[in-house]
Amino acid sequence: MAADNEKNIIVKTSDEIEVMRQANCIVASVLEMLQKEMRPGLTTRQMDRWAHDLCRDHGAHPAFLGYRGFPASLCVSINEQIVHGIPSKKVKVREGDIVSVDFGVIYNGFYGDSAVTIPVGKLTARKERLLQVTQEALERGIKQVKIGNRISDVSAAIQKHAENNGFSVVRQFVGHGIGASLHEAPEVPNYTQDQPSPRIIEGMVLAIEPMINIGTAKVKVLKDGWTVITADKKPSAHFEHSVAAAPEGPLVLSRRKEEL
């Protein structure tokens, strides 16, 4: 049975996927720079400025700046903040923090999108484990991007790994298709649902992004209208890659050098 939103999926040509690979290489270079520069005392506003400037140096446009009114180029979410944190000159990262940075670009008409959670100095064992499990969950989800599989296979792989390790997955925010628009069909939840999900077909490009919490899966949105935090204020991690479905298997477009 076809899923309701299957007819809305836009598949990409090989030429379009190549442009998306170039867009995601720019995203990866920005995230690599932020990983290198992360240190106690750094303000989130400075991170945003660096990300914006490097993006423009590559001839790309920062995709999040102005998107639905978002006021910055980079999302920076610290500790209990899950996603959509707004950079500020008043917010400095501290030793022991985990900092999720989510960045997107528009390049030659197509989007790139990726995220990584960066440790600041020495972490508690629980935070270290959270980052490890979230990154592993992303990789397990990516492995399910096989032609003929369903989106629910990606979701199940992520949820199973997170919950088997004692963590919870966020349900109110999910991954998505991506292409000439930042958010396209289908949605890519990090949990399974009791309804049919779309088949994975050649040319589909997905932004897979597990958001995994140490405590409750419940979330709150702060008064700024953007920043999402865990309801129990325990830490959360977020990793994301843009992945194309190819005949030879999943093609990760946003790999950073450390992952190659």
Image (tube, rainbow, N blue to C red):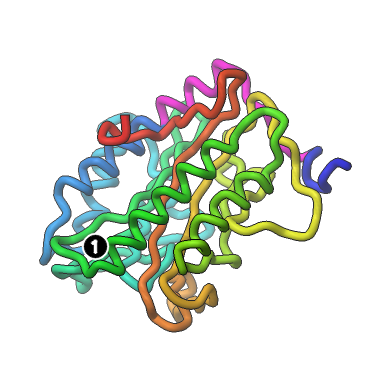
The picture quadrant where one finds residue 194 is bottom right
Q: Provide the residue designation for mark 1.
A: 44
Residue situated in front as seen by the camera: 174 or 162: 162
Residue 246 visible, this orientation = yes
Which residues make up the magenta segment? 8-23
Residue at 36% of width from left, 72% of height from top? Answer: 235
Residue 89 visible, this orientation = no
Q: Secondary structure beneath disc 1?
A: helix
Residue 17 drawn at (x, y percent):
53, 23
Residue at 34% of width from left, 50% of height from top? Answer: 116
Residue at 42% of width from left, 66% of height from top? Answer: 82
Looking at the rendering, in which quadrant would you find the N terminus? top right
153 relative to 133 in the view: left or right: right
In this rendering, the count of numbered labels is: 1
Does residue 137 lie above or below 53 as drawn?
Answer: below
Mark 1 closeness class: few <14, some 14–19, many ≥20 residues within 10 Å: many
Does residue 257 lie above or below 246 as drawn?
Answer: below
Residue situated in front as seen by the camera: 150 or 24: 150
Q: Main secondary structure of the magenta part?
A: helix
Residue 231 drawn at (x, y percent):
47, 81
Does residue 70 lie above or below 239 as drawn?
Answer: below
Residue 180 forms part of the magenta stretch: no
Does residue 4 lie above or below 9 as drawn?
Answer: below
Residue that protrudes farthest toward the top in the picture: 15
Residue 15 forms part of the magenta stretch: yes
185 relative to 175 in the view: left or right: right
Residue at 47% of width from left, 47% of height from top? Answer: 138
Report the amino acid beneath label 1.
Thr
